[in-house]
């Protein structure tokens, strides 16, 4: 069995999939709750749309190779921050920073790493704020604003 097949076998594991699905659900629910709070304060919500995703085994292997890591499951779950993620597209940059502050105020999970790609854009030009969470399955969260045409990828 080659390394990609071994990676795929671990990726297809029900416990692994459930853990990541639960992590994404927790984050989506928190974003919806924050949207309701924001709407009560301002009269308008910040969410244009929320999407979730899980990297495919092929995409995981490609990223591991690109970063010069061994292609195996243990390396993937420790070295990659974006195996599973949630993206919240907002109407303005101001709202993104509000979300980032609010997400950090919860006991449900801890912000492990935050990157501000609005102030310091990535090479691909995709401006967003990315936060990596723990205690919820290491689920990455990206928030981007629609004013900058931010429908793309993170990580």
Image (cartoon, grey):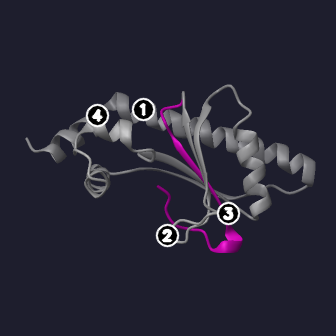
Dot 3 or dot 4: first in sequence order is: 4
In the rendered structure, find residue 99 and report the number of the disc placed on it.
none
Is 118 left or right of 55, judged from the image as shown? right
- Whether residue 12 is visible here, answered yes or no, is no
Residue under label 4, please give it.
Answer: 74
State how far apart marks 1 and 4 are (Cα). 17 Å
Give the magenta range.
Answer: 136-155
State how far apart marks 3 and 1 are (Cα). 35 Å
State how far apart marks 4 and 2 are (Cα). 28 Å
- Whether label 1 touches label 2, CB < 8 Å: no
Q: Position of residue 90 (x, y in %)?
A: 71, 60
State how far apart marks 3 and 2 are (Cα). 13 Å
Q: Which of the two residues, 14 or 27, is positioned nearer the viewer here?
A: 27
In the rendered structure, find residue 18 and report the number of the disc placed on it.
1
Q: Residue at x 33, y 31 (%)?
A: 14
In the rendered structure, find residue 119 and report the number of the disc placed on it.
3
């Amino acid at each position: 069995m080659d390394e990609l097949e071994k990676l795929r076998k671990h990726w297809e594991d029900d416990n692994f999939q459930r853990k990541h699905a639960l992590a994404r659900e927790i984050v989506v629910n928190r974003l919806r709750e924050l949207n309701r709070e924001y709407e009560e304060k301002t009269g308008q919500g910040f969410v244009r749309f929320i999407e979730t995703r899980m990297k495919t085994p092929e995409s995981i292997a490609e990223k591991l190779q690109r970063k010069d890591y061994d292609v195996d499951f243990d390396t993937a779950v420790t070295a990659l921050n974006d195996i599973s993620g949630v993206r919240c597209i907002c109407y303005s940059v101001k709202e993104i920073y509000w979300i980032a502050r609010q997400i950090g105020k919860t006991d449900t999970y801890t912000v492990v790493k935050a990157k501000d790609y609005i102030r310091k854009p990535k090479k691909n030009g995709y401006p967003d704020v990315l936060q990596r969470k723990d205690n919820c399955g290491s689920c990455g969260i990206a928030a981007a604003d629609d004013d900058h045409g931010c429908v793309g990828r993170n990580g």
